[in-house]
Image (spheres, helix red, strand yellow):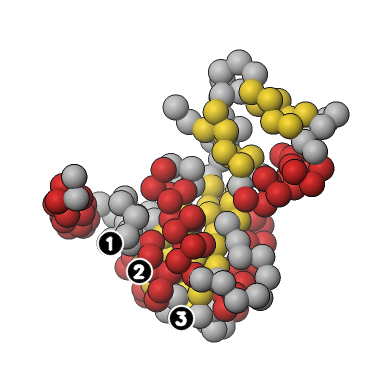
Amino acid sequence: MSRALLTESDIRAARGGVLRIEGEFLLTPSAQDLALKLGVRVVVARPGESLTRGRRVVAVAADHAGFEMKEELRRHVEALGWLVLDFGTRSREAVDYPDFAHAAAQAVAEGSADFAILVDGAGIGSCMVANKVPGVRAAKCDSMADVENSRKHNDANVLTLAGRLERGLAREMTASWLSLEFEGGRHARRVGKIADVERRYALKTI
């Protein structure tokens, strides 16, 4: 069953302190904080369509070293027409990147988001974390060539970037990455083998 993704804007739109939705729902961390602050209750009505039906969703997350880049890319992605789920961090205060990268990658694996964009100092650690989540294919990209290859050939569903990347290039890379489609064909066979490796090791943990 699909689950509605409730963001801060949904909480602010609640009338009389009550937000009525249909079916199951998930609150983004920022939406949960705002709901507690404003005293908004989420009430489930009859089963029906998800609030996000027909909308493309991107999860974003960063550590303190990627915070400023994440904020800029969040606004950029929203301007491109995507619904953005922001999993933090929300300041430059030092945090541990695995916590935030995992949350956003998990949203992709569970189907709550179509893609995720992760930013930390080098982009490497978040990529490593994301690729531990079953179903995630994270790619650390430093150039437009990396972006094109990761989407067209590898069907990457998580993009990781270095916070020190030049901002204009980061925006261009993000827009291109979100617009590109997987080419399939011979690449589908190879991506399928990535999934086979993942399943092989998953079986060993049962």
Q: How would you rate the neighbour count of disc 1 (Cα within 10 Å): few for under 14, some for 14-19, many for 20 or more?
A: some
Q: Position of residue 142 (x, y in %)?
A: 42, 79
Badge 1 amino acid: His
Q: Is residue 59 left or right of residue 90?
A: left
In front of the other: 53 or 113: 113
Q: Amino acid at mark 3?
A: Ala
Say which residue appears at 67% left-offset and 52% top-offset: 30
Tell which tag, 1 or 3, sits nearer the viewer: 3
Give the side of residue 15 with respect to residue 10, left or right. Answer: right
Disc 3 is placed on an element classified as: loop
Q: Residue 68: which quarter of the image?
A: bottom right
- Residue in the foreground of this view, choosing between 1 and 30: 30
- Which residue appears farthest toward the front when viewing the image? 206
Q: Are marks 1 and 2 in contact (CB under 8 Å)?
A: no
Look at 52% across and 33% down and name the residue there. 3
Q: Secondary structure at mark 1?
A: loop
The residue carrying mark 2 is: 128
Where residue 16 sits in the image (x, y, percent)?
85, 29
Rendered image: mark on residue 153: 1
What is the C-alpha distance between the residues marked 1 and 3? 23 Å
Which residue is disc 3 drawn over?
A: 122
- N-terminal label among 2 and 3: 3
Residue drawn at x 31%, y 50% is 135
Q: Amino acid at mark 2?
A: Met
Q: Quadrant of residue 22?
A: top right
* Secondary element type, mark 2: helix
Mark 2 Cα shell of 10 Å, populated few (<14), some (14-19), many (≥20): some
